[in-house]
Amino acid sequence: MRVGCAAGDGDEEMLNGFTAPRSLLGAAALVPSPPWHFAGDVLAVEFWNDPDVSVDALPAGVELDKESPGRSVALFTDYQFTAQNNEYLDPARYQCRSFSVLLDAIWRGTRIAWCAYCYVDNDAALMRGWIQGYPRKLGTIHQTRTFATASVASAPLVNGARFSACMSAHGRLLVQARVTLREKAERLAGLLDRRIVGRRYFPRLCAGMHDKPAVDELVRCISNHLLITNIWVGESEINFPEAYGEELELLGPLKVGRGYRFSFSHSVTDVEVLADLTVQQSRG
Amino acid sequence: MRVGCAAGDGDEEMLNGFTAPRSLLGAAALVPSPPWHFAGDVLAVEFWNDPDVSVDALPAGVELDKESPGRSVALFTDYQFTAQNNEYLDPARYQCRSFSVLLDAIWRGTRIAWCAYCYVDNDAALMRGWIQGYPRKLGTIHQTRTFATASVASAPLVNGARFSACMSAHGRLLVQARVTLREKAERLAGLLDRRIVGRRYFPRLCAGMHDKPAVDELVRCISNHLLITNIWVGESEINFPEAYGEELELLGPLKVGRGYRFSFSHSVTDVEVLADLTVQQSRG
Amino acid sequence: MRVGCAAGDGDEEMLNGFTAPRSLLGAAALVPSPPWHFAGDVLAVEFWNDPDVSVDALPAGVELDKESPGRSVALFTDYQFTAQNNEYLDPARYQCRSFSVLLDAIWRGTRIAWCAYCYVDNDAALMRGWIQGYPRKLGTIHQTRTFATASVASAPLVNGARFSACMSAHGRLLVQARVTLREKAERLAGLLDRRIVGRRYFPRLCAGMHDKPAVDELVRCISNHLLITNIWVGESEINFPEAYGEELELLGPLKVGRGYRFSFSHSVTDVEVLADLTVQQSRG
Amino acid sequence: MRVGCAAGDGDEEMLNGFTAPRSLLGAAALVPSPPWHFAGDVLAVEFWNDPDVSVDALPAGVELDKESPGRSVALFTDYQFTAQNNEYLDPARYQCRSFSVLLDAIWRGTRIAWCAYCYVDNDAALMRGWIQGYPRKLGTIHQTRTFATASVASAPLVNGARFSACMSAHGRLLVQARVTLREKAERLAGLLDRRIVGRRYFPRLCAGMHDKPAVDELVRCISNHLLITNIWVGESEINFPEAYGEELELLGPLKVGRGYRFSFSHSVTDVEVLADLTVQQSRG
């Protein structure tokens, strides 16, 4: 049996895992270590909200993009995740559906997509998002899927095909969207052409320091090996019903633009810290 | 305001809906009226259980198939449903995942697939199953999906690709399966080549009649417009962990055969009553 | 009237269980055999809807009560269930939350409470409801609980204490309610003083018979050993947000009355068939 | 140590909320600001695991308690939460069920209860746990409840009454427990008599720093206004089935001790950092 001494006195950490719970084998960790690989289908809607309101969704240092004030994108994603241990063979734990709102914004002169809200349907994805700078909460997300055989139930990828998506949290509907496909496209235009920027934020609970987070960083996601295919563009509808305990409706559409449907894959191993807003404390 | 009189006295039913709850507009019914259309992906495993045990899972009049005693198929299905009102555009309510066990059996000399157990993940599908003769309970079902872009997370349809599936109910794991794809096939051999037969069973609650169901019928499902595509065949593994309150493990595998992965669509508007086992009662 | 012969001609049924799936041991059945015992907490709201609308929620033969036209009760219930096998020790499967709307009505001169809608959060309760004549669908139901220790989180049973309840289905909020306790009462007045009447309804799927259900009965629930305690009465609020695919909002309140909070227990072994509306078919 | 300049250079933060997502009104934050108040019911089981194994569940600096090597407590909690905005009136979001394992341990000579694993069933509680130092993951947790009216379904607080509890995650059963009440007690003996110590751990994602967390602190929870009532003590059973992707079974029981059932309330506004294990980085 181990004899203990104070942390930092040369005692070696025996526990493993990228996140808590740290454990002997490291298998219990909520999130496995990067690299993380993702493959999925996306339904997306371009819309414009009120820039006088959405400007208030931005942290200090991030501005709305004056060339496209209020332009935003809502993304519904059905995806499969894997890290180094064949996580895609554990679909109960690692398949995921997500919803995000990205705002056209500017960081120090560079065009970015600010991730204002993000919802996912499992705990590993929730925590992974917090680590990546996506301010995730749990939601229940659905989108119409397309299947390979011809049927009125199949939602084929053809001109006129319709796809719906919705997201709710705690039994309240927060978003509904509809896309009608019009034409196949070679490239995604007006979508995912800006780096996504978010905020890693982890509060302190010590008395008197509740407003002095232990981590407060603006970060730019670094995505590798991005592949996009089966791109369709068309018309769209979206609305954000008002709901107690949420502020998503403040970013709701004044006008709606294109709708998109496509498949993607990419990998993540890194994040770039654009600014460290943490107010340092003497610790320990 | 309506003046009432006894049912059957010429009073006309104002309520609508294929099932309860019957309502003014018929929109509240748990299950919409047929025809029902389905499109989806299937992961399937062929296995043999102990015929001395599985024979006891059959109702009177249904026998095991002596040419393939104990041969069974486990089907994991991810599907989209629609009836006449674009239900596929309401994915939160009408997308479904299911798991079934089908036993090779004989009904009056004809080869059938007896549906011993079936689990689904939403209420409309649960009730639709009871109406079709599938003895459904709620379960949580997952299978590895395939996505269009190349990635270690994509599970492409290629030789060597692996797919997992699992089903749990009330927090207990009831089935785990694995399929490794080996070759593309033109036709499904040894699968879905028998008509599925189930039992419509709806009990009475009147005192003294708890064992005299109001509906007890053996029925053969009639499926129209069946299309199958993207068929892959390979090796498989499956196991049925023991769980309190379930008997699925009694049908567990002594031997495992082929694994399958394919896409399908079909429609349902009818069922054929093979035998009415209901003991009639004077009613009213 | 049954035509044809019995399945197997003398073959004896080896399967057990009150409902499907019938099985060797009878342990797999979705619903265990009665008697069924219930104990729980209720939050209830009395309200009046538009009788010109709610009259259309009634089946032929059931009238609104002219002495209290449109008077209804919304019941939120947190309960524990047990049958003969200590089901209360399997809380993952047998604890339940439910929501019901009961309308003051008349059946052949007798005052009844018509169960127009009912939602529950598990599959055993859903099917048990269909057998009892409650037109259940799955919903997610919550109510503020009361705990034994003093705390702002405890919601004690005292004058001024507030309780909330809500119900959603498929991510759409369908009901929200609030009760503020005012005084302890010796007896429930104006609540549960009418027999609950519902409709057992199980459709046929055979072509041409989709509107000729196999079971269509008006039934009166028979409840034994009803105990009510810890009764508090106060003020209430309730609203039924409109939601696609639901008609609950048609029964929404024009006026709200008393709120109630109490604990109960009772048992069920029987149901009385008031009228058999089934159109008999030759079977075969 | 921070290098670089502040974001926006004097720009003031307009966003509010104790956690992400930070927003204009602060209502969207996943976790509301402390103080946090809790009231609930607990089912607890005392057990002994293998100290040669459980020693490896401890971080550097924490030792097993040599006076009670391997002694642990499993706690199942049903509770209601509120902060400053009547969160207890939003039960869909803020009621919670949790499961924790606490190990008898020593920190610098002081007896502590080390929180090795913790599971909860909602996102606000999950994140609140990470902030408090509990390594939470999502789980589905149930315990037999007690109701006020006499019934075989009520599970009254009497000698011989039985209570069950279970926890599963992602459809795998991780813990099952049973307590049989024997006698009412005035005080909790052998339970909650040590301060709970956990670890706040928030990783970095920057390349090369995946093993250098941004936050790594051993913390002691500070609980105020703790009230305990309705204490019953009896016999217990517990087991931890093995499950892929979990390590809980490594802490499973060699021997089982007392079972407990009680109600509690307490408040949290603070945490004490016992040791800051964070390896500081130049940031910026």
Image (cartoon, coloured by chain):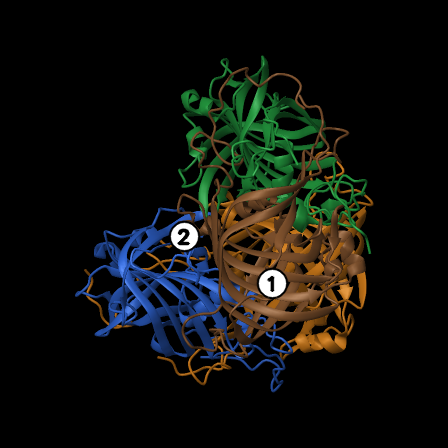
Chain colours: A green, B orange, C blue, D brown
| Residue identifier under label 1 | D191
For mark 2, give the secondary structure. Answer: loop
Q: Position of residue A48 (x, y in %)?
A: 46, 23
The relative height of residue C140 versus residue B102 in the rendered view (above or below) is above
Q: Position of residue D130 (x, y in %)?
A: 61, 44
Residue situated furthest left in the rendering: C67
Identity of the amino acid at label 1? Leu
Q: Chain of mark 2?
A: C
| Residue identifier under label 2 | C152
Of marks 1 and 2, the one in the foreground: 1
Q: Chain of mark 1?
A: D
Q: Is residue A72 visible?
A: yes
For mark 1, give the secondary structure. Answer: loop
The quadrant in which residue C195 appears is: bottom left
Q: Nearer the viewer, residue A198 or B73?
A: A198
Residue C86 lies left or right of residue D37; in this view the side is: right
Q: Nearer the viewer, residue C117 or D100?
A: D100
Q: Nearer the viewer, residue B189 or D38?
A: D38
